[in-house]
Image (cartoon, rainbow, N blue to C red):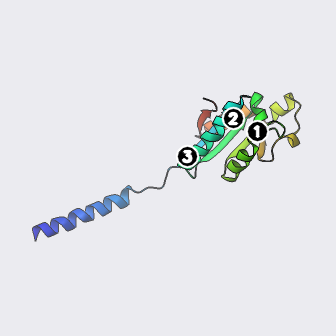
Amino acid sequence: MKSLLFIFAFTGILFVNQAIGQTPEKEHRIVFHLASADTLVHKALVKQLGNVLDYWKTAKIEVVVHNAGVGFMKKDEAILSKEIELLKERGIVFAVCENTLKQRKIAKNQILPAAIFVPVGLAEIVLRQEEGWSYIKAGF
């Protein structure tokens, strides 16, 4: 009788611990910083973005593109436009710096339609970090 009571008590404790220990998955928010013209960096970034989303399906990800990295999002230079579109469909935001466009005399219509535009790329990164987003520099 004592053994049976012990088994029921132990089983009950396990179920209570399991129920209490279950918490919703933490929201992951990550800002990636791309300022490189190197297409190997672009390929690595696309792979890394996919890997993160495969692991954390609901992660919020923003890629801030500025300076020499703008070719990643230019229609006539982007070698990964199909991959970028697929990643956008998975929820990734590709934010292109308007300052870079002005300095390089690039019109917004020269940028892939997957893009959104932000006034200052570096300021966008700072804002995200101030909101608690994790920062990752694109590259190796």
**Which is nearer the eye, 127 or 9?**
9
Could one spot residue 34 in this view of the protein?
no
> Is 112 left, or right, of 21 in this rendering?
right
Going from N to C along the chain, the mark reached first, 1 or 2, is 2
- Residue annotated with mark 1: 79
Up-down relation of residue 52 to residue 33 (above or below): below
First along the sequence among labels 3 and 1: 3
Q: Amino acid at mark 2?
A: His
> What's the residue type where badge 1 is placed?
Ile
Res. 47 in view: yes
Position of residue 68 relative to residue 92, above or below, is above
Under circle 2, the secondary element is helix
- In percent of width and height, residue 50 lies at 61, 45
Q: Which residue is mark 2?
A: 42
Is there a contact, CB below 8 Å, between mark 1 and mark 2? Answer: yes
Residue drawn at (81%, 44%) of the image: 112
- Residue at coordinates 61% horizontally, 36% vertically from top-left? 129
Query: Is 106 left or right of 38, judged from the image as shown?
Result: right
Residue 118 is labelled as none
Q: Residue 47's image quarter?
A: top right
The residue that disc 3 covers is 28
Please tell me whether residue 67 is drawn above or below residue 84 in the rendered image: above
Nearer to us in this view, 84 or 24: 84
Q: Which quadrant does the N terminus fall into? A: bottom left
